[in-house]
Amino acid sequence: MKTLDRIETFEPFLRNLPDIEHSPDPRWLDGASLVTVSPENPQAPIRAYLERVREFDSDHIRMISPVLSRLFHDVHAELALDGVHTELVMAEDTIDRARSLNPTEFKIVVSVGVLDLYRYPDSLGFGLTLGDDQLLMGAYDSGGHLEACVHSTDTEFLQWGEKLFERYRGQADLIEPSFSFPFSLGP
């Protein structure tokens, strides 16, 4: 597939990313899968994300998430129960909302040893989930709705995603657990 064809094919994804710095090189999209919203299937990218995350074969996941969603929470909780550790970068206002919606659950989730939660000072306009050998990247509209989800195993795309994650994590503050459990989740 030629570069211009890739750009055209992945246009619903690329146009919803914050800017060019958050856009992967079109060459890395060769072989990637794209799922977008449609009038007939507005939840398609969310379902695709959930299905792919369940297939991750990794004991460590790194994420950037611009939204708070029970659907995403539930699938990642399943992974946590399987012993998968997650590093998650979220915007400060999203974390504050999570804390205020259910303070007890928030304290427990941050304290059980399966999640390192990082508070990013500004809003986030994209999502990124990295496993050992694959990534998912989500493009959101201005209202925080997932418009497109890309899945890839391309090594260069994965390395770029890792650097992007490290940049955001490096600009975020780790939220310290308010208490610790004498045990950990998982096998």
Image (cartoon, rainbow, N blue to C red):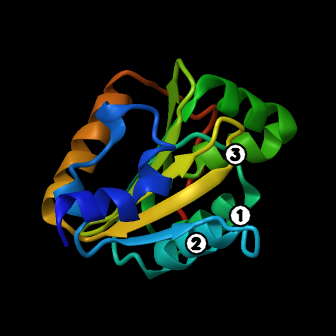
Residue 82 x %, y %: 50, 76
Q: What kind of residue is marked 2?
A: Leu
Q: Is residue 106 above or below residue 136?
A: above
Q: What kind of residue is marked 3?
A: Leu
Front position in the image: 125 or 59: 125
Front position in the image: 121 or 45: 45
Left or right: 141 as drawn, with respect to 87 = right
Residue 132 x %, y %: 26, 66
One can see residue 81 in this view: no
All told, the count of numbered labels is: 3
Name the residue: 32% across, 33% down.
Answer: 20
For this orientation, the residue located farthest to the top is: 121
Left or right: 140 as drawn, with respect to 68 = left
Residue 71 x %, y %: 71, 64
Name the residue: 58% across, 52% down.
Answer: 112
Which residue is disc 3 drawn over? Answer: 68
Q: Is residue 135 above or below residue 19?
A: below
